Image (spheres, coloured by chain):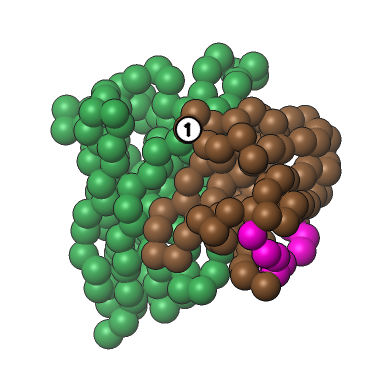
Chain colours: A brown, B green
Amino acid sequence: DIQMTQSPSSVSASVGDRVTITCRASQGISSWLAWYQQKPGKAPKLLIYAASSLQSGVPSRFSGSGSGTDFTLTISSLQPEDFATYYCQQANSFPLFTFGPGTKVDIK
Amino acid sequence: QLQLQESGPGLVKPSETLSLTCTVSGGSISSSSYYWGWIRQPPGKGLEWIGSIYYSGSTYYNPSLKSRVTISVDTSKNQFSLKLSSVTAADTAVYYCASVRYSGSYPDYYYYGMDVWGQGTTVTVSS
């Protein structure tokens, strides 16, 4: 089974900050990685698929990169609506999946 | 615009079977562009993928839950369902259904992500 880890588990940041979240797979997954944003009491929302492709309607301040085992999600200028928990998900074993444990972005 | 809605009992007794249904609207569950998935989230914890199904009935389960999970599809009703047997308090969670968008065929799939989610339904396991 492919295991996913994320770091940090939480980050405190201010509006306007650049925020980077890292996701690591226990084995190579090519570019089969997605990122999701989840706000309290809401369903997750797809941000990025195939490691770096922006989902339609998602602001361009979100970007993804990486391949193999190491991936990053970057928010270039944090906005108030971006305070949330972010999850990575591997899809190399499609249609079986694994989520990362999540990274909470909160207000400094 | 694809929409998904979960339904089912909010309270299940320990050792019994949890049953949920996801109704798909705004599109066909028989689309060749989608698998359909169940994901859960225990209180205060992260997301756990439970399983996926194709409209043909092909199923794929999380190995950690495989012995207790059954996912089925009813194309006539545009619905897919989850059954989780022998539940315990550890199965208390918000359960989500989601569309799993893709293209291609084995082994050359292209994965576009879980692009539409239901609002989630809370299931509590308690006597």
Q: Position of residue B120 (x, y in %)?
A: 34, 56
| Rendered-image quadrant of the N terminus of chain B | top left
Residues packed near mark 1 inside 10 Å, few (<14), some (14 to 19) or many (20 plus)? few
Q: Quadrant of residue B68?
A: bottom left
| Rendered-image quadrant of the C terminus of chain B | bottom left
Left or right: residue B21 versus residue A38 is: left
Left or right: residue A8 versus residue B60 is: right
Which residue lies at the image location 76% right of the left edge and 64% below the top edge?
Answer: A8
Q: Position of residue B23 (x, y in %)?
A: 23, 41
Which residue lies at the image location 62% right of the left edge and 68% below the top edge?
Answer: A106
Which residue lies at the image location 54% right of the left edge and 51% below the top edge?
Answer: A37
Q: Which residue is mark 1?
A: A57
Residue A11 lies within the magenta run: yes
| Furthest residue toward left | B77
Seen in the picture, residue B91 relative to B76 is either above or below; the reply is: below
Q: Quadrant of residue B94?
A: bottom left
Range of the magenta residues?
Answer: A6-15
Q: How many circles with numbers are drawn on the protein?
A: 1
**Secondary structure mainly formed by the magenta segment:** strand
Q: Amino acid at mark 1?
A: Gly
Seen in the picture, residue A39 relative to A66 is either above or below; the reply is: below
